[in-house]
Amino acid sequence: MEVLVVAERLAGEEAMHGVMKVIRPVGVHSEAAVARRQHQARIIQIALGNHDEAAAERLAEFPHGGGQLLEHVQGVETEYGVNRVEPQVVWTSIDSEALFSLQSANGKDSGLRCAIHYLTGRYPKYVKSEAANLARDEATAALFFASAAGKRVAYIPAVGSMSDALLEKIRHVDLLLFDGTFWSDDELARVLGSGETAHQMGHIPVEESLRLLKNIEVGRKMFIHLKNTNPILNEASREHQVVRQAGWEVAEDNWQVEL
């Protein structure tokens, strides 16, 4: 039997087309064997968030008479995608600015210390059931790591605005890993024809970050968390050259940095 699983776009991510790996089914229902021939193809479409209505419109794109074979699953809670197998996800409260140790998988002290600086912003659209119980000023966070040798790393993959407090904490770190999601504020609309702005999604565009962090005193600085629409991924692009000339690096998969 052929099984085709089609995942609709995630709400708020108008251009996302990904691959879903089913770890375990959310629900199982029995079905009489005579109701479907064993060689008949099945099309299972999963629509998340506000794209439930889009499922029907997409059927015409599929072969095998998709309209008759579709099994459309709606209203899937996102927590199934985060916590597939207990206890895969364990929630721990962390006080802002309090230094704590990071342990290895076997419970040993890694020698690294970490502090969190909470950033104002909005929670992603997939945060639903827990949003009412979460503080708005804890929607995103910057992480600051320190080694036993005194080396410091700032990890800030999502930041919607820059504050004096954040700038001061970044200053003099040995490595700055900073939000490089979008190059421009209107990137999605310009490249894909629709979508929210970078600021609406909680990201400072790189072209603005270059100005805001122009005089920041750090060791190395890298843009991370890059969306595939960001032109700085193309080493031949003007935008990539602007970033490099400003003293920034563009992180790549599997990079290891020694400080």
Image (cartoon, rainbow, N blue to C red):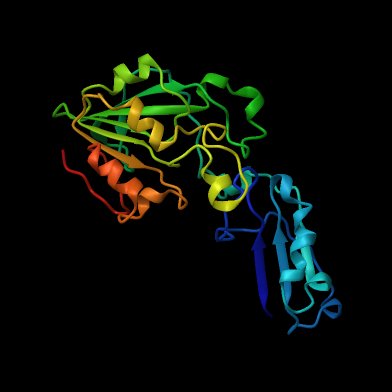
Quadrant in the rendering for residue 168: top left
Front-most of 156 and 202? 202
Quarter of the picture holding the N terminus? bottom right
Does 224 sit above or below residue 144? below
Quadrant in the rendering for residue 208: top left
Which residue lies at the image location 35% right of the left edge and 25% below the top edge? 212
Residue 75 visible? The answer is yes
Provide residue 25's location: percent of width, then percent of height: 66, 58
Which residue lies at the image location 36% right of the left edge and 14% below the top edge? 165
Judged from this view, the residue extending furthest toward the top is: 164
Which residue lies at the image location 59% right of the left edge and 48% below the top edge? 81
Front-most of 22 and 6? 6
Provide residue 68's location: percent of width, then percent of height: 84, 72
Judged from this view, the residue extending furthest toward the left is: 149
Q: Is residue 235 left or right of residue 56?
A: left
Provide residue 2's location: percent of width, then percent of height: 67, 78
**Count of marks overlaid on the render:** 0
Front-most of 134 and 163? 163
Residue 83 visible? The answer is no
Quarter of the picture holding the C terminus? top left
Does 100 sit above or below residue 181? above
Judged from this view, the residue extending furthest toward the front is: 238
Q: Is residue 68 left or right of residue 196?
A: right
Front-most of 3 and 244? 244
